[in-house]
Amino acid sequence: MTKHMRFALVMAALVVGLYLSAAVAVSVGTSGLGFRDAAKALLGRAVSPTAAAIISLRLSRVALAMVVGASLGAAGVALQALLRNPLADPYILGVSGGGALGAAIYLTLTSSGMAAFAAFERWGFSGLTLAAFAGSLLASAVVLFAGRKGGHILPGTLLLVGVMVNAISGAAIMALTYLTDVAQSHNIVVWLMGNLGTLSLTRGALAAAAVVAVFFICGLWTVGGRLNLMSLGDEAAAHLGVNVGRTRLVSFVLSALVTGLSVALAGPIGFVGLVVPHITRVFVGADHRLLFPAAAVFGATFLVLADAAARAAFLVFSNPAAPEARPGMELPVGILTAAIGGPFFIWLLRTRRARYFE
Amino acid sequence: MSSAIRAEKVVFSYEGKPAVAGVSLDVPRGGFVSLIGPNGSGKTTLIRLLSGYFRPQEGKVEILGRDTARMSRREMARTVAVVPQETTVTFPFTVEEIVLMGRFPHLGPYGFEGENDVAAAREAMRLTDTLAFASRYVQDLSGGERQRVIIARALAQGAAIMLLDEPTAFLDIRHQVEVAALVRDLQRERGLTVVAASHDLNLAAAFADTLVLLKDGAVFAEGRPSAVLTEDVLAGAYDQEVYVGDCHGQPFVVPRFRGA
Amino acid sequence: MKRLLLAARSTFAALAIFLAAAPVVSPAERAAAPAHVASTSSSVAPAKQYRRIVSFSPGVTEIIYKLGGQDRLVGISSFSDYPPEAAKEKPQVGAILNVDAEKILSLRPDLIISPPGAMAKEKLTRLGADVEFLPDKTLDDLAKSFVRIGELVGRPAEGRALSAELASAVAAAKKRNASRPPVKTLIVIGYEPMWVAGGYGVVDELLLAGGGQNVAGAVRKDFYAVSFESVLASEPDVIVDLTLPDDAEQAARDAIVAFWKRFPTIPAVKNSRIEFVDIDLLTIPGPRLVDGLARLEKALRPQESLAPRPRPADAPSPASGGSGSEPSGARQMTNDASRGGGSK
C-alpha cells in the first residue's frame, strides 16, 4: 500500500470517526437527554422546545470543541516541528501565559457578573475573549522579537524566551489572584481550567472563528513540506532550498494566531496540543503534509469525545428513577484530556511505533 | 566554462575573526577535489561558501559560470548538493521519505512529489545500495548505512555538483572505503563534480584528483596528491612532523611520534 | 561508607553554624504563647468578655454593629464594607488569604473571630489573642453565632434576640408558604461558567423557607458551577440573579436580561421573571439575612404582600438585664410587640 493510499484511508477513517464522535457527544449531557431525542431533534421531528434548546446547546458546544481541538492539534504539530522537540505544545511559546494574563487583567478590572461580559462586546465576542486574544498576541510578539539573534529566529532561544514569558505571566496572575477579592480571583482560577461550555459566543461569532481557524490551519499545511526538511536541521534544509527563516516565521505566526484564538474562545485546555500530534504520527507517519490535516481532524475528534466524557462524568451519580435529582455538574475538560490522552499515549509508546531518539 | 566551481578571493569572518581569508579555487567539471588542512583552517566554512549557505563578505563564488549571490536558494539546491558530517533526524521518517526530501528543489507549487520524483529517488537509492532500507526508519540504521542514505538524498537532488563535509568522519575503515569508493564511482560514471573536505589524508590521497591544503583560512598548497603530500609541506601546514610513504603506488602519511 | 561519614560531618558543621545564630532570631515567636482557641462546639459558658476584637468575617462585623458592640471592635477584614461606618472607622487587617499579621499585632487584640478553616487556623492562632472559630454555613450555625457573639461582646440579650428574630422570620415564612406550591427557582451568583446556589447552606435554606424549590438543589454544595444544559432542562419559573448590587445601573440589568432572552424555552425567561437581589443580603452571614429572606419571598411571589414582621416569641423584656445602652434592635421589638403582629 503506498503512502498516499494509506493516508487516504486514514483520513477517511478519521472523518468518519469525527462524525461518530459528534453523534455521541450530542447524545450525552447532564440533562439525561439521549440519542433518540437528539436524533429526533436533528431530523426536525417534533420534540419539546426545551429538548430542542438543549440539543442546540450541545451542537454549539460540539462545534466549538471541533474548532479548538483542530486548532490545537495542528498548532501542536507546528510547534514540535518548529522547535524540533517532541515535548513542545502550542502554549509553550507564551501564548497561554499571555492569554491568561489578558483574561486575568480583564476579570480584575471588571466586576463579576454578566455585566462584565456584555460591557464590551464586539462582533459577537465578549470582552473577556477579546482581552485573552490580545494578551496572547502580545505575548507571542514579545517572544518573537526577543527570540531572535542577529535577525535569525533560533529554536533554542525561542523556547527559553517562551518559557520565561509564561513564567512571568504566571507570576503576574498569581499576584492578581492574591490581591483581588475572592469572587474575582475565583473567576480567574476557573477560567484557567478552560471552559468549552462558554455561552458568550454568538452563532455567527463561532462560525467566523471556525472559518478563520480553518484558514490558519490550511496556512500551516502549506509549509508542511518545508517543515519536513527542517527536521533534518537548519543547514541541511537550507541546502535543499528551504528559506529557513521565513518558514520558521510563518509557522510561528500562524500557530500563535490559531492557538491564541483557541485560548480566547475556550480558555487554556491542556494536553491536546501535546498528545494529538504524537498519536497521529503513529498512524500517519512523520510527513507534515499528511500530519497537519490528520492532526486537525483527530484533534477535533479527541476534544469532542473528551468534552462528552466531561459532561457525562457526573451522570454516574444520578439515579434514573429520580431525574429531578440529576447532579447538573460537569468536570473541566482539561482533566479529561489529560486523563485520556496520557495513558493512551503511554500505551502507544509501549506497544506500537511511537519512537523518538532511541 | 569548463570550471564547475570557481571561487575568487573569497573572505568570510565570524564575528570579526576571519575563517576564510582570501581563497581562490577552480574546480573543473567532473573533477574530484579534496580540501584538507588542520582544525580551524576554514574547510567547513569554505564548503558553506561554495554551497551558497554563506554569502562571501568579499570576493565571489561562481557555480557553472553563474554568481551564487544572484542565484535563488532553489536554483542553488538544484545545482549543488551537500552531504553534511552528521545528521540528526528528530522525527521518525523512513529512508524513502528522507531521500524524497532531496527532490524538494524540483517540486511544483503544491509540494507533492510526482512519478519522476519517486523514480529519481529510487534510482538514487539503487546507486547507493540503500533500496533495501526504503521502508525502515533512518534512526535504526548504522552510521555507514545512514551516510549512504544521505548521499542518496544528495543524489536525488539531481545536482551536477556534490559537496561533502567530512563524510567519513564517524565511520570505521570498511565504511570509509565504501563511501569514498561510492562517491568516486558516481564521479566517474555520472560526471559528478565532487569537493570533499576531509581530515583523513590517506583517504583523500587515494580518491581525489586534486588536493587543496588550507591553513589559517588561506590556500597553503594545491595540486596532485603526490605533490601536496610531502613531508615539508605537511609539516608546514600541520605543524607536525610526518613520514610520507608509498604502498603499491598508493601514498600514505603517518605522523612521526616523538619518543617512539 | 567514607562518603556517608563525610556527608554526616558536613551536615553537623552546617547545623552548628546555623543553630549558633538561632537565639538571635524570632523572639516574637517565643513571646506569642499558644492562645486559647475555641469553636462553638467546644465552648463553655460565657466566661470572658473581650474588649479588643478583630473580626475576620464581614458577617461578624455586621453582627457586632447590630448588637451595638462596635466600640469593642478594633479591626475588620478588608472585605467588610457594611455598615458604611465600619469601613470608615475601623482599621483593616487583610483577609484570610493575606493576613496582615503586623497590623493585627499592633492593634493588640484579645480576641479574633473568624470562620473556620485550615488556613485561618494556621494564620490566626499565633497572634497572641484568643481565637473563636464560628461556622457560618447554615442557618443553624448562624443562630448559634448570633448568641455567641452577643456573649463575647457583652450583649448576650441582644444576641439572643437577634437569633430569635432570624429564627422566627424563617419560621413565619415557612408557615406562610406551607400551603402554596413551591416556585421552581434558580439562584445565580455568577456567569461564565454559571455559578448557582446548590442544595446546601444559608441561601438554599432561605429559598426553601421563602416558598421556593431549588432546581439546582440536587448537588449538595453551597455554590457550584452548573452545566447550562441542566438549567435548560430544569425549566425554572423564576431566576434570581445575585450578581448586581442594588445600586447597579439599569444597563447592567438589561445586559443580563438580554443574555437570558437568548434562551426563551425557560419559563422564567418567557414570563419575564428574572429578579435581582443584592448578593450581600443573602450571602453575608449576618443580620441582613432577614431582609434577604423578605426580598427573596417578594421575588418569588411579587403579587403577594408580606405580613408585617412577627413578634419574636421569646424576646427578653427590654427593661430587665442587659449591659450598656438600649440597643436599637430591642426598641424595635417593643414596637412590634405593642402593635400585636401577625398570626402566632
Image (cartoon, coloured by chain):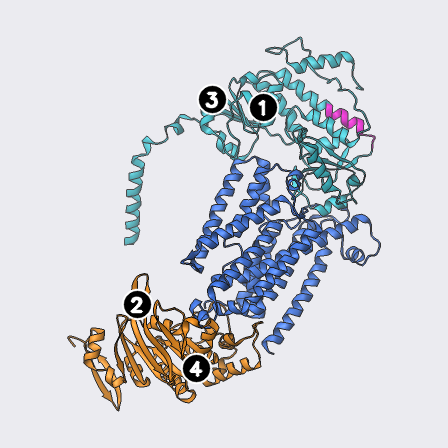
Residue A74 located left or right of residue B95? right
- Whether tag 4 and tag 2 are in contact, CB under 8 A, the answer is no
Task: Report if residue A172 is visible in the image.
Answer: yes
Residue tagged 3: C107
Task: Report if residue C126 is visible in the image.
Answer: no
Residue for point 57% across, 55% down: A257
Front disc: 1 or 2: 2
Measure how far apart labels 1 and 2 are at the Cα level. Answer: 78 Å
A323 or A42, which lies in front? A42
- Subunit bearing disc 3: C
Residues tagged by mark 3 and mark 4 found on one chain of the structure: no
Residue tagged 2: B19
- Specify start and end residues of the magenta stretch as a single range: C169-180
Residues tagged by mark 1 and mark 4 found on one chain of the structure: no
Q: Position of residue C163 (x, y in %)?
A: 67, 22
Label drawn at residue C61: 1
Q: Answer few, some or many: residues within 10 Å of disc 1's Cα (few below 14, many 20 plus, some between 14 and 19).
A: many
Q: Earlier in the sequence, mark 4 or mark 2?
A: 2
Label drawn at residue B160: 4
Question: Which quadrant of the rendered structure holds the N terminus of chain A?
Answer: bottom right
- Colour given to chain A in the rendered image: blue
Measure how far apart labels 3 and 4 are at the Cα level. Answer: 88 Å
Label drawn at residue B238: none
Q: Is residue C177 magenta?
A: yes
- Subunit bearing disc 1: C
Query: Please, what is the three-letter code of the amino acid marked with disc 1?
Result: Thr
Residues tagged by mark 4 and mark 2 found on one chain of the structure: yes
Chain with colour orange in the figure = B
Measure how far apart labels 4 and 2 are at the Cα level. Answer: 27 Å
Residues tagged by mark 3 and mark 1 found on one chain of the structure: yes
Q: Tell me if residue C4 comes above or below residue C138 in the rendering.
A: below
